[in-house]
Image (tube, rainbow, N blue to C red):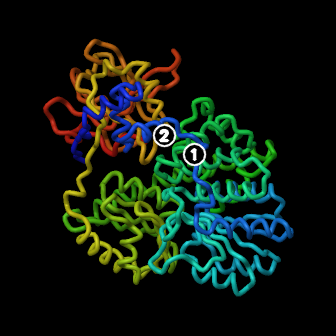
Amino acid sequence: MRRNWRIKPADEQRVSWLADSLDLSPHIARLLLHRGAASVSEASDFLNADIGSLPSPFRMAGMEKAVRLIREAAAGRGKVLIVGDYDVDGLTSTAVLYRVIGEIGADVSCHIPHRINDGYGLKTDVIRRAAESGVKLLITVDCGTTSFEEMKLARRLGLETVVVDHHELLLAGPPPASAFLNPLQPQCGYPSKDLASVGVAFTLARGLLERSGSGWVWDHLDLVALGTVADLSPLVGENRILVRAGLHRLRGTRKPGLRALLSQTKLEAGRLTTEDISFCLAPRLNAMGRMGSAQTSLQLLITEDSEEAGSLVKQMNRENKNRAGLEREAFQRALAKVEREIDFSRDRVIVLEDERWHPGVVGIVATRLTARFHRPTVVIALSGPMCRGSARSIRAFPLVEAFEEVKEHLLEFGGHPGAAGLTIAREQVPHFREALNRVAQEWIDPQMLTPSLEMDAEMPLSELTDGFMRDLEMLAPFGPGNPRPVFVSRDARVPAERKQSPFSVMGVRFTLQDARGRAFDALQPRHEIAEGWNVRQLPLGPVEIVYSPVRRLGSDGLQIELKLCDLKLPNTAAGAGPIGMGTGCPA
């Protein structure tokens, strides 16, 4: 797809002022300004990301009561049940609270819904079984914000309830829980509004241990980093602080399950990054929940038995391979359906349904379709009279608000502006498609459907030095809200000997040179190969590239690698023709 190249503007006087004030290179000062650090104090806070600067947990609405209910349950040895979600954010949230609530002496157990049999969220049969077994306190994590009737049932059955969540509230407001923890609720004074569920759970854990005066909550930052990165939460403010400290904790984790997972993936623990979580660790943890039961993944996160952890990781790897195969098949089928069924002159939202799609992979397929076509996408698995679907979107089309406009066609829905889930009656799918596209016609202007590729600066390849890369890594961890810096260089050349590597799980590496002949490894990402772009089509000579520079451990030590986002021959349009690339730089 053709994309507009755009260099972000910067006030060069402010760049020089910030660079002089903090003794930084102009490039780093410019990047800080692009990330919203407009003052010396904001830039210092961004670079330091001090764990000691976290707000008091008791600034979050509902925290005092939630802490009191849990401490009372622990003091009386009352049964506590945590109901989580089957994605990595839900699993890590559950694991954090299971460990911390257990540390203060409560009789605590967990339940993770089965994606296929139960679907998302708290169910009435779980509440009834909990009441029958003597549970006194029910805690939901990464769900519960929309569970109005379920909370009423729990109250009638004599259960106290605590909701720990981060999803958007519906127009009806907060659920009738005993205590409701969600920074998005009205009148909540907690300043961090974009926490993942595991971030909210960790805030509750801090509050519990602050009142109890025992325990060591920081040991669980490894789980917080996993869940926050896997849920694509913006890595700014508190999330950046938690993930930066959590990565450090994860590199030396003492949890047997995480140690086994790192060992199996053969990641270099000492240089673990957010990309390693996104592309290696999270997919394995998610695989069990996508294919059925996520209890295996939860057990891996809470076990203290190294032998059990090794066995669980092997099982997880088998399911991940199975998931990858189903995903490939579903995506190829979805592409064919787009070509046959979608009229881009008419349809501003892609809505696809199929009986052969596994409900556990529709979210991944929706993500890939949105990235490829730059349109909101809903993918529905037709698995019976009640069907489940996942949606992904672009900035101009907030999903939960859009679903509110067409809720007469939906049984359930919830999520975030950019990612949401839904349950729909099979016969309603065509009506839902028409209604959602009517909303999109009003909300989305045609120019919003042309993606742009934003670059932080233009920079000659000759300026890519080891010193510059060390400075660049001060801005890590990278991800949504703080993407890897992206540069455009117009002095790259394709040499006669391009030293192309074999295809690997990451893609294809080949050689580019700067104007002086210095060689760089360039990575053509795997998803770009799938879109038909191939290094063999590049003619020798000059080429303009957009890329993120990274340092990779190679046979000769740390080497600079160019992760390509797009490229073009001089005086041609970006993203057009046989060498145009597709979906953008990695986070």
Instruction: Name the residue that disc number 2 marks.
Output: 45
Q: Secondary structure at mark 2?
A: helix
Q: Are marks 2 and 1 in contact (CB under 8 Å)?
A: yes
> How many residues crowd around disc 1 within 10 Å: few (fewer than 14), some, or many (20 or more)?
few
Vertically, is 307 above or below 562? Answer: below
Q: Is residue 559 above or below residue 113?
A: above
**Residue 148, position as x, y percentages in the image:** 57, 81
Q: Is residue 360 left or right of residue 528?
A: right
User: Mark 1 = which residue?
Assistant: 53
Under mark 1, the amino acid is: Ser
* 585 vs 328, nearest the viewer: 585
Residue farthest along the top direction in this orientation: 516
Q: Looking at the picture, does residue 220 appear above or below residue 407?
A: above
Residue displayed at 28% across by 33% down: 457
- Frontmost residue, 142 versus 262: 142
Tell me how many marks there are: 2
What residue is at 36 percent from the left and 41 percent from the top? 38
Q: Is residue 24 visible?
A: yes
User: Residue 208 is drawn in which quadrant?
Assistant: bottom right
